[in-house]
Image: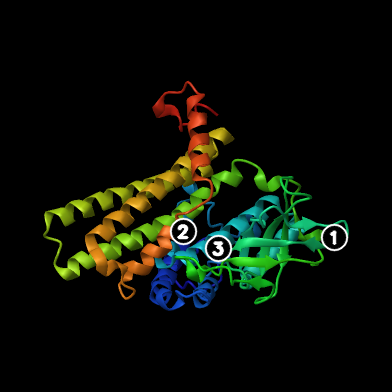
Amino acid sequence: MDLRAPLSRAYDAVAAARQVAVTAAARAGEQDRDDGFPADDVADLSHFGLLAAPIPSDEGGPGLGEEPDACNLAATLRLVGYGSLALGRIYEGHVNALQLVARYGAPAQKARLFADARAGHLFGVWNTDAAGDCLRLGDDRRLRGVKTFASGAGFVTRALVTVKREPGAPPLMLVVPLERGSRADLTGWRAHGMRASATGTVDFEDIAVTEDEILGAWNDYHRQPVFSGGAWRFAAVQLGGIEAVFDAWRAHLATTGRGDDPHQLARLGEGAIAVEGALLWVERAARVVSEDDLAPERIVAFVNLARLAVEKAGLEVLQLAQRSVGLQGFLREHPLERLSRDLATYLRQPAPDRALTTAAEEILQTDDHAGDLWTGGAA
């Protein structure tokens, strides 16, 4: 199949992701710097149709994510993350933005923004405000403030952002067009890993907002289970990073001839269990969200458990790999070094304790048997 042909329902996003992952993995080392960004890999995402892939089928797109159980989307995100977690983070935000446009956009908005995705525009979702403040939409329809921890800052040209009337108030979504290289400050992003994600602060001060740029209604962004349930997507990207660490560890044991040691074999076996467990959690979470058969609270509870199970698997694989490889795995020339830094950083997602306890509260208040919690009986 020619992946560069016009996209259709027959488009193979998983095959495209495999190709992108190979070149992304080869470039990731040179992008691992404070001013790094996987620009060539984003160009590949466009070239091989992945930027347009999430456009719904009823809008003339391939409808990536519409397949039963969202299995192709899960595999695509996992493969892109395997090639580069920084790229995976950027692509997951792009997918999230297009899915929000599909859900909440007016017909004219969808036509315009999906055309932008086809043309190669990179979308992102930026919802983090500066401490004690928020991005505001003034009565004069001009923006006041900044967004922080914005991945792809300076490279995203269609930014889906949330604005509020005051801190703590319900948000409103906007899709703001930006010029590449404008309004971004990356000087504060001096992270341990994910250095190539171009995560920084974007200044929206005095940008005029048109009616066409307002997406949905106040507080649509926080509607459940879409808001929290979408966390399975970043868990899928994390899974790709876990698999990359596992494969680098396994390759080290094979090339150094240390695989005959029973202790090394035991650690590798434990790592394989963790990797497969994470895969099963991600696939089940994608299915639970896609089927939408449970009450919203139950869907959110399952996805919260899934994201924590993936985090736990990632931390376990990191510890096992570093113990097996030893000091060599901390030297910059070793493949495990950057992979470990990127994964350890990307595993740090917000509010893990709250995710766990809210899931446990949902489980505690039901009389369903353990085996029936996620089967639809409580919907």
Amino acid type, mark 2: Tyr
Is residue 60 shown to the viewer in this render?
Answer: no
Depth check, front residue: 220 or 186? 186
Q: Is residue 75 above or below residue 198?
A: above
- Left or right for 298, reference 138: left
Proximity of marks 2 and 3: CB atoms separated by less than 8 Å = no
Q: Identify the residue under disc 3.
A: 53
Hey, which residue is sitting farthest top in the picture? 367
Q: Are marks 2 and 1 in contact (CB under 8 Å)?
A: no
Sequence-first tag of 1 and 3: 3
Return the residue found at the far front. Answer: 132
Circle nearer the N terminus (2, 3) = 3
Residue at figure coordinates x 28%, y 48% from the top left: 273
Pointer 1: what residue? 141
Say if mark 1 contacts mark 3, CB within 8 Å. Answer: no
> Residue 376: x and y, percent?
50, 31
Question: What distance separates the C-alpha of mark 1 from that of mark 3?
Answer: 33 Å
Indicate the amino acid at tag 1: Arg
* Disc 2 crowd, CA 10 A, few/some/many (<14, 14-19, 20+): many
Ranked by sequence position, the earlier of labels 2 and 1 is 1
Residue 166, horizontal then vertical, whole percent: 77, 49
Mark 1 falls on what kind of element? loop
Q: Which residue is mark 2?
A: 346
Q: Which residue occupies the foreground of this view, 256 or 306?
A: 256
Of marks 2 and 3, the one in the foreground = 2
Given the image, on which type of amino acid does mark 3 rest?
A: Ala
Element at badge 2?
A: helix
